[in-house]
Amino acid sequence: MTTKQSPQALNDTVIKNGYCVGCGACAIPERSPFKMVMDDYGQYQSVLKNSDIFATTQSDYEKICPFGSGALNEDEIAKQHFSETCKHNDQVGYYSGVFAGHVSEGDFRKQGSSGGMGSWVLNELLSKGLVDYVVHVKSENADVNLHNLPFKYQVSATLDETQKGGKSRYYPIELSEVLKEVKNKPGRYVVVGLPCFIKSIRLLQAQEPILAERIRYCVGLVCGHLKSAHYAQSLAWQMGITPQELEGIDFRAKDPSQPANRYNTYVKGHSAEKVVLTNQLFGTDWGAGAFKYKACDFCDDVFAETADIALGDAWLPEYVQDGNGTNVVVTRNQDVQQLITNALAEGRLAMDDLPVEKAVQSQDAGLRHRRIGIIDRLAFEAEAGHWVPAKRIKMTHRANPGLENEKQRLRVKMRELSHESFNLAKVRSDINVYVKSMMPVYTKYKRLGVSLKSRLKSKLKRLFYGN
Ligand SMILES: Cc1cc2nc3c(=O)[nH]c(=O)nc-3n(C[C@H](O)[C@H](O)[C@H](O)COP(=O)(O)OP(=O)(O)OC[C@H]3O[C@@H](n4cnc5c(N)ncnc54)[C@H](O)[C@@H]3O)c2cc1C
């Protein structure tokens, strides 16, 4: 047992080096010396509040943190849960079923960001009596307006309450408050979360039997990365609503007449509401990674590999034209798989079976960033003599060649610059401070993308036609 050293060690490695993803797991154990705070960048971060408590805490914090040195990795956790019933794919993790489709019943699809499966699975587990409570992310004021800020993890006990928690919230959230509620209130729960958050839950369950007993299912979201609160503010500000005025946001307002990837951003201020096509707003290119948590650049789990089911967008040519939204779905748990099979037979879901390679294809860009680009990003940190979290990738892998390596440098630069320049923009009350700081780096990054593409084309030409 490493009780005394463990909080300090976590603080000196993960937290001090910027790898805290703000999940809140370390603040959950009894007498935890950690608390969650929103930092100046608009990200939840763990803070070591009191070293006197070390003597009384019983938890091993390095084993709870998803980036902690003592934590099992995603493969090791997933193997314990799914290896007996599932097949395995390198990029997707374990899987029993792989689908693309949407919910046909009710308003799930209309009210969801993609095909509506997120809220549907939670509802189905509740209505079929497999859980008593749903732990999900919704507006604190969902009764007034579903999109009102702030969004936070909450417990729902009815189908009506669950349905108010639809939509992807590209916004900081943390688990410590809600999981303390779970510990205090007996019952069976399902939790929805990003890959690293679900990993935290699995790690917590290994140390806290009460959470192992109560959290019966984990629903994972496929993940590109998590954004700070300033991402929402930056979008609204470009639409004429200042950070002080911003009351609510829908990051994924659908336009069924357009392809699924041409969605809108809806914002609500004190006295106005606005809707703009998202890709017309600066900073919405996910590859560029504005307002990304640093930790996300050091996570290699795209398909929420430790969750019972993973849900994302089917970014595939066959489905992207449908602006109503289509999910990619990976099942790993037999109960969840059965719910889907039954609902398909009853016509409540419309799903196609997918070869697992298609699921991989649907997240091509995210996987390249997380699984290939990570080699360079780890190398940058190691070169600078910084501590890095242990990853599944072996550091004996060679760094990527020239332009790819440069692309990763520019992505890191944009991540850092977005946080800093937006704070300066706030001080100067001028959104252009942020846009103008970012633009030269972003332009360079886009030019590099063009060079990389044309190199790839020439390579393919040579391959197929010779010379
Ligand atoms: C930060 C983030 C990054 C993502 N990146 C990708 C990606 O790169 N590729 C991809 O295909 N899909 C990604 N997704 C998932 C995608 O946006 C949809 O959430 C997913 O397809 C489910 O859509 P749906 O219509 O089925 O769910 P809905 O019916 O809209 O339900 C969504 C569920 O997710 C919960 N939720 C919303 N925001 C959060 C959050 N921040 N943390 C935890 N739970 C939340 C809601 O409470 C709700 O239960 C991301 C989601 C988030 C939040």
Image (tube, rainbow, N blue to C red):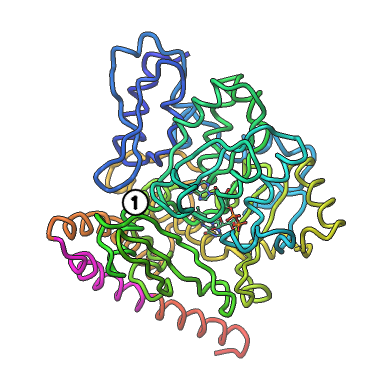
Q: Residue at x 63, y 34 (%)?
A: 133
Q: Nearer the viewer, residue 329 or 129?
A: 129
| Left or right side of 180 for 337 | right
Secondary structure beneath disc 1? helix
How crowded is the residue under tag 1: few (<14 C-alpha within 10 Å), some, or many (20+)? many
The segment highlighted magenta reads 429-448
Q: Where is residue 467 in the image (x, y as percent from the top left)?
A: 54, 90
Q: What is the three-letter code of the residue carrying label 1?
A: Ala
Q: From what the image shows, is residue 421 above or below residue 325?
A: above
Q: Where is residue 199 in the image (x, y as percent from the top left)?
A: 55, 37
Quadrant position of ligand 1: bottom right
Secondary structure mostly taken by the magenta-highlighted segment of the chain: helix
Q: Which residue is drawn at 48% across and 48% down?
A: 142
Residue, disc 1: 229
The furthest residue to the top: 55
Say whether residue 178 is left or right of residue 120.
left
